[in-house]
Image (cartoon, grey):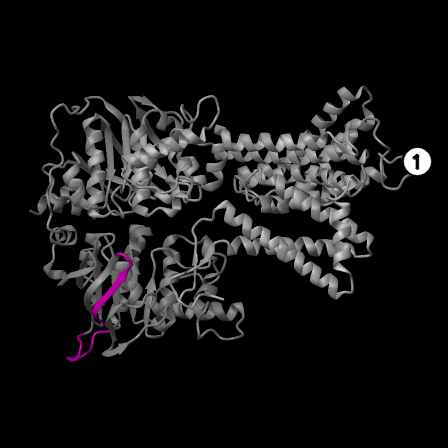
């Protein structure tokens, strides 16, 4: 968007106007996690303030505090110059703070007018459908968000639903509008319409906090940018002083410890010439028909670690599912040893020596209510000594569980207790060892270090490099760039389901990866130094 | 406020058993109290109940007769609960099995050695057919099986009544709402107890072994505990759901076959006698374990048998239901309380 929003410029402020929202030293702790530490931030009337940060940087927690969902453990919220305690979301709404979440909170079976008036103090106590629709029409015109008052939410596109959400917030006299990844679900045209409307909103002296991962759009629309990292605010910059490259660096760049784990010990398996598994122009769609992977082509070679970088939700889940036979592509081919797989089946992939450490262990890799032995048998129950001839030998399963627990250095008091009684870290280590046992050819590891402490992370990464040296092909999906740069041989970057590039990790730099993660193509990055 | 109790993540079987025994005793004490309050002599009634259930040969025979269908319907509900499904339709499948068996028994004549297996086969097939539609709806369209299986119960009960008073009605003796006595019967084993009793025991034992000691049983267990993990491991969840539900229908139907061919010897309205519903109670008491079905069915049989005794003492039939409910209620409280233990660190322990 090069056309400058001349009509949407903020009106000049009289000196001494207090910020709409001022956060002073906000801290929030969860058991074992510092979500926010000493965050101070001010949002002025008439500005669009972008909030940038990686996953887990503390953006969501901070916004939950601002909207009254969480209470800060330390610090103060100042609205229009007065300190306030926002005890509930209702109080935040009354104070003029409205948030539009990434996942809309609308009643699908209700009409637009009904959703707008739901739980609103200004809704007339006895209102007919006609009155509600007339009121909605009036609101729609007043705020410049076109909606059809009588349409059912379920029949609307994502962009239309978002307009309803925003209108719902604006109708409650919000002066500070918080948008979480608003363009993630929009077409480019819808995104342009949204930005135009936001500029009008800003011109009336209101403010917007925009959470986004897309650097281009942040550069286009925002007035100032604050960057969070690891729960702390790194800084607030005027957008005019920023470049996408500098933002990417600041967002992801910490003091990188480049600990090269790529070096092979003598005797390690070389990188295989022929790929063990390949994807050719693979496209997948979710149930709504939206493309989750777009035209992905890649090869996995034995003895090599392929890192997958990207902001969460850009196709990582689908990629791991396609690679392990859980998800059949809507278009394109999976080549196992160069032969196309007609109907992917996870059991077949497992027997072919493909292990899978899934992203969400408890939900997809374990049966939480069953005992540890049953859970550890999940990959080997169909072969001796546990399986064999249709049987199931509980003793053999327990012996296997003991073996896996020993390898994972997890101490288990009772193998008959449900696995959910173990800590997340121990579950993780057990699943990793279980999968490594069957991963003769390929291991697909999604966020294997998530939720682990530093020592455990080193252990798990050690597992991966050991496997690599034995000639196994490894896919490591991670949100931790440092980890990828240290361990991976090549790094592929996913953005909106597209494999933006696959680059050599030894020479890769954080900045290029950051830009690719934000949706800039390699051609774009060539211009910046 | 200081915490005085602590919740245990898992409960040992012994601990659970103690709490359950306590719950049953509490329920009996409460029953006694109310019987005394309504002017009965609890000691006299208790003596009568004991004498006519476990205290005499006739009582024990009755107990075994009650236990036979309860073991099978209890197993039917337990097997689906393993895969996270509730078959509320054991009652209907019981009727279907009874109809199938009676149909063969009435109209196919031959030596018992041939007719009895045919009756069993046909009855089981009818039971599976009765659960087929809910099964397919559940497996392929995710239609809630609780509603579909339940509603078919009423259809089956009405169909049975229709057959018993209509086309299959006994025209010779003119008995109301019943078919003629079947020419073949499951041979008796001990008094009125027929071979259906040891057969049911064997079926439960085989089922327990299948679920605990076979690959198929393991796959069912995983599919029930977490379908997503099952898919991750390549287990065909849908096929397992279909198989388990059909097996459940077959087990409930087997109870119907044994009741028709061994105990009642004819098809009559209301022959299921709520055994299908009591099967749910048995399964709840068994907590998903097939072997636990045996003691649970025994307890249930004892309650039903006692109920009949109490009815001869001019207590209404609803008293029996109330006692059943009370026992279940106390047991579920006991199961929950078994998860808690007092925290010993606080000086002022809970009273």
Name the image quarter holding the N terminus of chain A. bottom left
Q: Is residue A197 above or below residue B19?
A: below
Query: Where on the picture, by quarter, is residue A507?
Result: top left
Residue at 48% over, 57% down: A152
- Furthest residue toward left: A529
Please provide percent x and percent y for residue B302. 70, 46
Q: Is residue A300 above or below residue A42?
A: above
Please provide percent x and percent y for residue A172. 38, 71
Please provide percent x and percent y for residue A178. 29, 64
Q: Is residue A443 left or right of residue B28?
A: left
Q: Assess whether residue A26 is covered by the magenta stretch.
A: yes
Res A201 seen here:
yes
Q: Is residue A427 above or below residue A116?
A: above
- Helix, strand, or loop for circle 1? loop
Res A434 seen here:
no
Q: Nearer the viewer, residue B67 or A237?
A: B67
Residue under circle 1? Answer: B173
Query: Where on the picture, by quarter, is residue B117?
Result: top right
Q: Is residue B318 left or right of residue B294?
A: right
Q: Nearer the viewer, residue A267 or B29?
A: B29
Q: Assess whether residue B265 is covered by the magenta stretch.
A: no
Q: Tally the marks.
A: 1
Q: Residues within 10 Å of mark 1 (few under 14, many from 20)?
A: few
The chain letter under disc 1 is B
Q: Nearer the viewer, residue A159 or A368?
A: A368
Write down the region rendered in magenta: A12-32
Please provide percent x and percent y for residue B107. 82, 26
């Amino acid at each position: 968007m090069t056309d400058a929003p001349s009509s949407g410029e903020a009106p000049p402020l009289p000196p001494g106007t207090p910020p709409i929202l001022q956060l002073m030293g906000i801290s929030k702790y969860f058991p074992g996690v510092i979500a926010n530490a000493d965050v101070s931030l001010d949002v002025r009337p008439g500005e669009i303030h972008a909030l940038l940060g990686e996953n887990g940087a503390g953006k969501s927690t901070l916004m939950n505090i601002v909207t009254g969902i969480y209470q800060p453990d330390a610090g103060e919220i100042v609205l229009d110059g007065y300190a306030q305690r926002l005890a509930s979301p209702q109080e935040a709404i009354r104070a003029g703070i409205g948030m539009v979440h990434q996942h809309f909170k609308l009643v699908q079976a209700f009409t637009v007018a009904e959703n707008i008036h739901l739980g609103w103090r200004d809704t007339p106590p006895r209102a007919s459908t006609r009155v509600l629709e007339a009121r909605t029409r009036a609101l729609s015109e007043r705020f410049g968000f076109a909606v059809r008052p009588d349409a059912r939410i379920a029949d609307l596109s994502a962009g239309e639903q978002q307009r309803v959400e925003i209108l719902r917030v604006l109708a409650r006299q919000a002066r500070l509008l918080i948008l979480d990844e608003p363009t993630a679900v929009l077409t480019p045209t819808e995104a342009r319409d949204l930005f135009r409307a936001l500029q009008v909103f800003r011109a009336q002296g209101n403010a917007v906090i925009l959470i986004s991962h897309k650097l281009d759009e942040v550069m286009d629309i925002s007035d100032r940018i604050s960057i969070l990292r690891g729960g702390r605010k790194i800084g607030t910059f005027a957008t005019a002083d920023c470049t996408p490259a500098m933002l990417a660096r600041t967002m992801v760049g910490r003091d990188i410890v480049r600990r090269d784990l790529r070096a092979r010990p003598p005797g390690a398996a070389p990188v295989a010439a022929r790929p063990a598994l390949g994807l050719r122009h693979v496209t997948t769609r979710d149930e709504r028909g939206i493309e989750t992977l777009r035209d992905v082509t890649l090869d996995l070679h034995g003895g090599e670690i392929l890192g997958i970088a990207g902001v969460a939700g850009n196709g990582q889940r689908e990629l791991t599912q396609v690679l392990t036979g859980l998800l059949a592509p809507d278009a394109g081919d999976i080549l196992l040893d160069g032969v196309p797989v007609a109907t992917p089946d996870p059991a077949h992939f497992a027997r072919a020596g493909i292990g899978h450490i899934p992203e969400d262990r408890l939900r997809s890799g374990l049966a939480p209510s069953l005992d540890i032995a049953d859970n550890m048998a999940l990959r080997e129950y169909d072969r001796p000594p546990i399986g064999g001839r249709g049987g199931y030998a509980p003793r053999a399963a327990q012996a296997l569980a003991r073996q896996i627990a020993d390898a994972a250095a997890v101490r288990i008091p009772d193998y008959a207790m449900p696995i959910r009684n173990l800590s997340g870290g121990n579950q993780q280590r057990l699943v990793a060892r279980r999968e490594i046992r069957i991963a003769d050819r390929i291991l697909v590891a999604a966020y294997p270090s998530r939720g682990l402490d530093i020592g455990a992370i080193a252990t798990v990464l050690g597992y991966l490099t050991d496997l690599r040296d034995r000639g196994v092909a490894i896919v490591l999906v991670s949100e931790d760039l440092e980890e990828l740069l240290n361990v991976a041989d090549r790094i592929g970057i996913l953005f909106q389901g597209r494999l933006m590039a696959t680059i050599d990790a030894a020479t890769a730099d954080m900045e290029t990866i950051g830009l690719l993660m934000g949706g800039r193509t390699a051609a774009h990055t060539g211009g910046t130094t | 406020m200081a915490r005085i109790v602590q919740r245990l993540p898992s409960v040992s079987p012994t601990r659970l058993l103690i709490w359950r025994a306590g719950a049953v005793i509490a329920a009996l004490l409460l029953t006694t109290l109310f019987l005394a309050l309504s002017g009965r002599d609890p000691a006299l009634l208790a003596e009568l109940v004991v004498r006519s259930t476990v205290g005499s040969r006739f009582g024990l025979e009755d107990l075994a007769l009650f236990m036979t269908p309860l073991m099978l319907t209890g197993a039917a509900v337990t097997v689906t609960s393993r895969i996270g499904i509730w078959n509320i339709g054991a009652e209907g499948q019981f009727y279907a099995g009874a109809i199938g068996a009676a149909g063969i028994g009435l109209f196919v004549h031959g030596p018992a050695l041939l007719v009895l297996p045919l009756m069993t086969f046909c009855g089981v097939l009818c039971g599976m057919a009765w659960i087929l539609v809910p099964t397919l709806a559940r497996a392929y369209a995710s239609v809630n099986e609780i509603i579909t299986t339940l509603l078919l119960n009423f259809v089956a009960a009405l169909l049975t009544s229709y057959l018993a008073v209509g086309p299959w009605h006994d025209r010779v003796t003119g008995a109301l709402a019943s078919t003629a006595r079947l020419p073949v019967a499951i041979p008796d084993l001990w008094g009125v107890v027929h071979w259906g009793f040891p057969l049911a025991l064997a079926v439960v034992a085989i089922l327990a072994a299948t679920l605990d000691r076979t690959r198929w049983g393991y796959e069912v267990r995983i599919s029930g505990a977490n379908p997503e993990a099952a898919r991750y491991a390549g287990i065909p969840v849908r096929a397992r759901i279909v198989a388990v539900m059909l097996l459940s229908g077959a087990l409930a139907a087997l109870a119907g076959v044994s009741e028709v061919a061994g105990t009642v010897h004819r098809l009559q309205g209301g022959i299921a006698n709520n055994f299908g519903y009591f099967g749910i109670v048995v399964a709840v008491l068994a907590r998903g374990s097939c072997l636990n079905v045996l003691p649970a069915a025994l307890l249930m049989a004892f309650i039903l048998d006692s109920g009949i005794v109490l009815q001869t003492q001019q207590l209404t039939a609803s008293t029996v239901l109330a006692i059943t409910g009370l026992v279940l209620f106390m047991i579920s409280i006991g199961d929950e309380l078994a998860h808690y233990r007092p925290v010993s660190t606080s000086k002022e322990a809970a009273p």
